[in-house]
Amino acid sequence: MPLSIETNCLHLENEKDGDSVCSHYSSISFPIYQTATYAHPGVGRSTGFDYSRLQNPTREQLEMLICELEHGTDAVALSTGMAAIALLMELFKPGDHLIVDSDLYGGTIRLFDNVSLKNGIKFTRANCAEDNLEALITPETRAIYIETPTNPMMNVTDIAEVSKIAKRHKLLLIVDNTFMSPYFQTPLDLGADVVVHSGTKFLAGHNDTLAGFIVTNRPELQEKLRFLIKTTGSGLAPFDSWLVLRGIKTLAIRMEKAQSNAAKIARWLKTQKSVVRVIYPGLEEHPGYKIMKKQARGFGSMVTFQLDTTEKALSVLERVRLIKYAESLGGVETLITYPTTQTHADVPEELRLKNGITPQTLRLSVGIENADDLIADLEQVLN
């Protein structure tokens, strides 16, 4: 019988027989193999590990865990989420065309516009939740790239429906699953070919390390990704791998608590006079609510809201105390972010405004504090 995801966050399936534990001196916490290289038992013989740029036991343990949680066939762990997306772009060659969601994390847009485009890869932006994607496909199209929910406007795309389009046209479907984590959503089960994560966020969960992941269920992609991570040298270091392993142990309880807090805060924000819009897919009026109910096991803990004036938005950022005004998301602490000057500062203003990111927009990554304490912090700045 397969392990539940709550248990799987702490135990690999192949550890149930105890062999893996015994091989590491019965250590409950998987060891940090802080080594650059490994001795060979003889000429032409290997322990399975030769050089830590190629593989490291701590990183391998983490990759196997992420692979199991996302229901893939292989996962690679990289130094950051952006390193993961950059490596992913190496699957494509000059002249290839990708359809990408217009509302993506600003760093992803910056990479596409300033690096991938320079390398000859072409992009068409679309609202992948609403637009006719088939009309955008050309003979050069190789992939569709989405986030769902998107960052920061929380647009929800039907993964299974986009997968049908991708398969009809022999395209890859790539899903950034950072906002939901495999605890709430497993895109490979819905027809995606590749899942990408900023592991810095919910997977690590403590705002103390950087990481990125690519997971696939396609053997030919697995082989290419292994070659690329070996060649580019962007693999995750042993200590950071251990930090993420430690973080994932509490993924289930963190996601549940943060989601419960987010739902309560979103409902409270709707009652505030200075708040003109609350965007949270767990609210029934959200246009993606029914899709989320169908394809995910929860709604996550990201809340975007818009205030009536720019001055009020800036005042909130200046005056919150318990909630920290900081970039990033997915940690145990609640963070508030100003997309206009932080996460999406390098996105052209025209695109920002088209996507709905105005100077009045704030993004909240809800943590695991007491929800009433968080509401009290917001109340003292809004009223």
Image: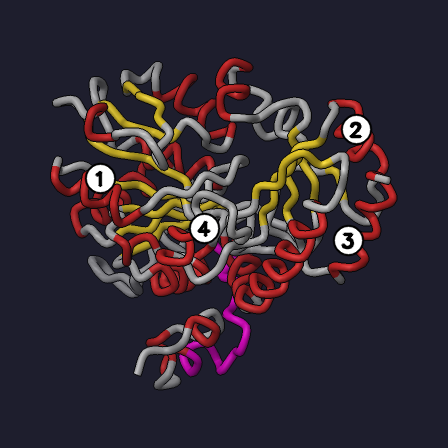
Distance from the alpha carbon under mark 4 to that under mark 2: 29 Å
Element assignment for label 1? strand
Name the residue: 35% across, 65% down.
68
Q: Residue at x 47, y 22 (%)?
A: 110
Query: What secondary structure is found at the residue carrying circle 2?
Result: helix
Q: Mark 1 or 2, which is nearer the eye?
A: 2
How far apart in space, not on screen, are marks 4 and 1 (Cα)? Answer: 26 Å
Q: CA distance from mark 1 to mark 2?
A: 43 Å
Cα distance in 3D space between marks 2 and 3: 18 Å
Disc 3: CA contacts within 10 A as few (<14), some (14-19) or many (>=20): many
N-terminal of the pair, mark 1 or mark 3, is: 1
Q: Is residue 25 magenta?
A: yes
Query: Position of 72 compared to 367: left or right?
Result: left
Which numbered disc covers residue 312? 2
Q: Is residue 87 left or right of residue 306?
A: left
Nearer to us: label 1 or label 3:
3
Q: Earlier in the sequence, mark 2 or mark 3?
A: 2
Q: Amino acid at mark 1?
A: Leu
Q: Which kind of residue does numbered mark 4 sit on?
A: Tyr
Q: Nearer the viewer, mark 4 or mark 3?
A: 4
Q: Sequence-wise, which precedes: disc 4 or disc 2? A: 4
Residue 147 placement (x, y as % from top left): 41, 40
**Residue marked by disc 3:** 374
Label located before the other in sequence (4 or 1)? 1
**In the rendered structure, which amino acid carries the disc numbered 3?**
Leu
Residues in magenta? 21-36
Residue tagged by mark 4? 289
Residue in the picture at 47% in, 47% down: 178
Mark 1–mark 3 Cα distance, whole angstroms, equals: 41 Å
Q: Nearer the viewer, residue 270 or 340?
A: 270
